[in-house]
Image: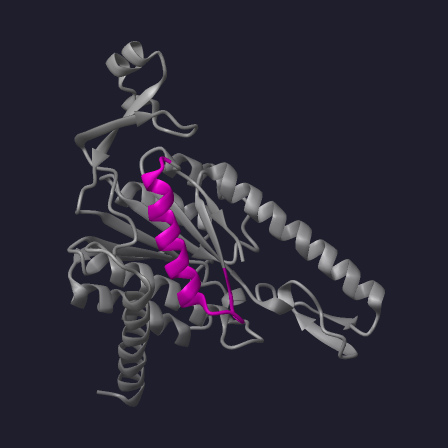
Amino acid sequence: MTGDYLRANRRLQQLELDVMRRLDGLLQGDFRGLVTGAGTEPAESRIYNVGDDLRRMDWRLTARAMQPHVRDTIADRELELWVVVDDSPSLRFGTARFLKWDLALGAVASVVLLTARAGNRVGAVRFGGGPLRVVPAQVGRQSALQLLANLDRSTRIHHAEGEPSSLAQALQSTARLARRRGMIVVVSDFLYDTRWEPAMRSLRDKHDLLAFELVDPRELELPAVGMLTVVDPETGRSRHVQSSSPRVRKRYAELASVQRAAIRASLRASGADHVRLRTDTDWVLEIAQFVARRRRLARHGVRQWSAVS
């Protein structure tokens, strides 16, 4: 075994320990997975809420009660999860506690390990840093750890051979791979690809969608530290910026706010649940809060919500 392999293995073991130990302490219940699945067996009926699937309308009870009702289903315990992971150069950026890529790997580890330990199949599609890379969906903890290892090794490949792939391409590929109803989790900063909304919306017709948006605080506002040389990680172009100017910092913050609002609007329009993770916050706690609230709202018939930090 090489030194790099041993270091990567220790990193994954520590990541698994940190993520699962903390999530087990924060989440409660006999099924601590990310989502329990839509289910096929009929359960109790309840009053219709905006956003409910019209195919589950209980027409007989609706006629008797003179008020729309839908019939819930018993949650399935089997789920196929596909994680679509951004590996573009912009994720090698970070000015707080870690890089955006570290945040991405942590988010992927959380959802993959939560899903795999319930006996579900997990697979991944990586895009951005080169051609699409697919890790086939498999069952079991060892398969989940191997998936994470495959993703983590990509951090040592700064420029992969071939043309960079896009999020839209990754989503289209995932649609072909995910033939059974399940869940799609997208982990990206959504900064450079703006043509993914139709592809994501088409996935929503069959799957649950969750989007983790990765953000570094310096992408939202500039510090007043004098002349800065900023580099676009995707193109390599650089520019000098006078960060001591209040006008420059204000304009930068305004444009960043507009950009993030547009990303949030597109994710909401596509039907995806949206969680923003920052490199300067406790992302494990944010994921646990999302999972817990998602389950509470699901019990009240709320199908989609957005949690933005």
In the rendered image, residue 48, in percent from the top left (x then y), is placed at 36, 25
In the rendered image, residue 114, in percent from the top left (x then y), is placed at 26, 60
Residue 58 falls left or right of residue 86: left
Which of the image's four quarters has the C terminus?
bottom right
Q: Residue drawn at (51%, 37%), measured in percent from left and top?
A: 269
Front in this rendered view, residue 51 or 85: 51
Q: Is residue 307 above or below residue 72?
A: below
* Magenta stretch contains residue 281: yes
- Please tell me in which quadrant of the rendered image residue 180 appears: top left
Q: Residue drawn at (71%, 54%), measured in percent from left and top?
A: 255
Say if residue 73 shows up in the picture: yes
Q: Residue drawn at (42%, 47%), measured in percent from left and top?
A: 169
Q: Is residue 117 above or below residue 203?
A: below
In the rendered image, residue 189, in percent from the top left (x then y), is placed at 52, 58
- Please tell me in which quadrant of the rendered image residue 236 appears: bottom right
Which of the image's four quarters has the N terminus?
bottom left
Residue 254 falls left or right of residue 153: right
Q: Which residues are magenta?
A: 277-301
Q: Residue drawn at (34%, 73%), measured in percent from left and top?
A: 153
Q: Is residue 285 above or below residue 256?
A: below
Residue 185 falls left or right of residue 140: right
